[in-house]
Amino acid sequence: MRTEIPRPIISVLADNLPDLETHATLNSLFLYADAPGESPEGNKNAKVQEWLLRVNKESPKPLVVLGKLLEKYMELPEEDEISFFDTYAKNRLKENQVFKEKLIKILSRYNLTYVRGGNIIVGSTVSSQNLKDLIQEKDIPAINLEFERALKSVDSEPLEAISAACNILESICKVYIDDEQLSMPSKQTLRFLWKVVSQDLNFDPSKLQDDDLKKVISGLYSIVDGISALRTHGSSAHGQGRKMYKPEPRHARLAVNSAHSLALFILETWNHNKIK
């Protein structure tokens, strides 16, 4: 789904970028972000506003352009990476840090999140971002594809998001089984894949001493059963019968976020076991 840059975000950029950039660096910034057309005429404030409105009107993916525009302000260096004697750079860093906080707040207001690498996504969570980082570390394209699909379709196509949530977990389980050279189950659906992975990672609640942790780990099995059932009965992965399931975006978001939390726990445990 094509999402335009909200007008209040355009206003924040038009008010702040002129204080941080020259005409020349603004031109370079917008060209780097693949903003359409030539540089607009006028002062810097008018230039930023007009160019962003043009992005909304002409660009097939306005949020992609926005992500590239914000990259230099969202991925700032640490203060200790700047020379102690470079006062100018330190002052610029402080200005950019203030601007970054403004950007985070305005993006959050419109359910947008900046993700490292110049990406803006809709409705992400902290665990989703951590999962994305772990997936990229392991370089698993199939999982990354489903992760992006789930995030993008939660609001517009909740049934697709539920299907993707299940696919995320299935993909992770299959990769784990392959990499760890385990026996692939004859039925490669989530419940059967999860059984192999959970046993190998020692997720059996009965083996835990802490009663509270037992309850949490037991919940992982409920997540798998619930997401599998949602996908079977309501998602686009299966044909609908007489009784139509119509999950709302909040239901899809619950399924996707649950899948993300479980996936993150699997990957973190996998990494933890590797460095033991």
Image (tube, rainbow, N blue to C red):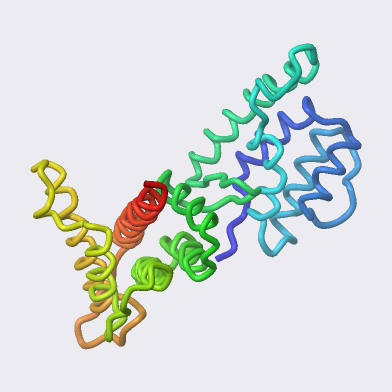
Residue 160 seen in the figure? no
Left or right: residue 152 versus residue 95 is left
Outermost residue, front side? 276
Question: Please, is residue 17 above or below residue 257 in the view?
Answer: above
At horizontal 36% and vertical 58% (from top left) the residue drawn is 263
Q: Position of residue 182 (x, y in %)?
A: 33, 73
Q: Position of residue 205 (x, y in %)?
A: 13, 54
At horizontal 51% and vertical 50% (from top left) the residue drawn is 133
Residue 179 placement: quadrant:
bottom left
Number of dots carrying numbers: 0
At horizontal 82% and vertical 30% (from top left) the residue drawn is 21
Left or right: residue 16 versus residue 224 is right
Left or right: residue 16 versus residue 146 is right
Residue 186 placement: quadrant:
bottom left
Residue 217 seen in the figure? yes
Question: Please, is residue 264 above or below residue 177 in the view?
Answer: above
Q: Nearer the viewer, residue 147 or 112?
A: 147
Q: Position of residue 126 (x, y in %)?
A: 43, 44
Residue 73 placement: quadrant:
top right
Tell me the quadrant of the picture where the N terminus can be found.
bottom right
Q: Nearer the viewer, residue 43 or 230?
A: 230
Q: Position of residue 70 (x, y in %)?
A: 68, 41
At horizontal 79% and vertical 47% (from top left) the residue drawn is 51
Left or right: residue 47 versus residue 215 is right
Q: Nearer the viewer, residue 243 or 159?
A: 159
